[in-house]
Image (cartoon, rainbow, N blue to C red):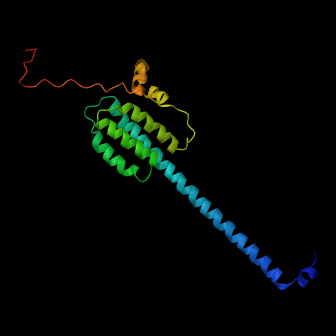
Amino acid sequence: MSLTDVVTLPWWVVIGSVLVAIFVYFFRKYYEDSLARRQAVELKLAERKQELYMDFMTKFWGPVTQGDAKFDGASFLQEWNRRMIFTASDDVLGKVQALQHASVAGGNYMKAGAELFIAMRRDMGNANTRVTAQQMLRSIVKAAEWDEVDKMLAGSWQPKTQPPPPSASQPNPKT
């Protein structure tokens, strides 16, 4: 096609072609910009989730499972839940509530915790994770306590209770 052929084309074909080219250029530019913005937001959200979930593991789960009597888990969870509401997935939010319910009701908080960790893994991008609650529990308890994992999953496990402190009305056997 030569220049004389283009000049002989109807004017609406030439203008239409130019308009389509302009439209395609701006659409592509808009799409690339919105894709870049979305990727930046997703990256920031992933960073916040990683920080949030690591805080839970190190500042809450560790002290709770190690029996730190001085640890104030309720105040930590209160502050952590405020941050979690805007960052975590719906599944993680539900699992946190299940963990809190199990803890308050004296239920199987270890199983609820394992399910929460699996939900956290999925939320962090491991959507097809095949880690089971048993594998998760075995990774967070001592190998000597692995036989307790089956009890935890079967629902027959109950948290060990601390013996009540001796009261003033009971005689102290050491005296």
Left/right placement of residue 113 relative to residue 36 reads left
Q: Which residue is drawn at 43% across and 40% down?
A: 54
Q: In which quarter of the image is residue 64?
A: top left
Give the vertical position of 18 relative to 43 (above or below): below
Give how far across and how far down residue 47 sits, in percent: 49, 48
Specify the quadrant that holds the C terminus.
Answer: top left
Number of labels in the image equals 0
Give how far across and how far down residue 148 sits, in percent: 40, 21
Left/right placement of residue 30 relative to residue 9 reads left
Give how far across and how far down residue 31 sits, in percent: 64, 64
Q: Which residue is drawn at 56% across and 42% down?
A: 127
Specify the quadrant that holds the N terminus.
Answer: bottom right
Give the vertical position of 62 relative to 77 (above or below): above
Q: Which residue is drawn at 50% across and 45% down?
A: 123
Q: Quadrant of residue 57?
A: top left
Is any atom of residue 142 visible in this view? no
Q: Residue at x 43, y 42 (%)?
A: 53
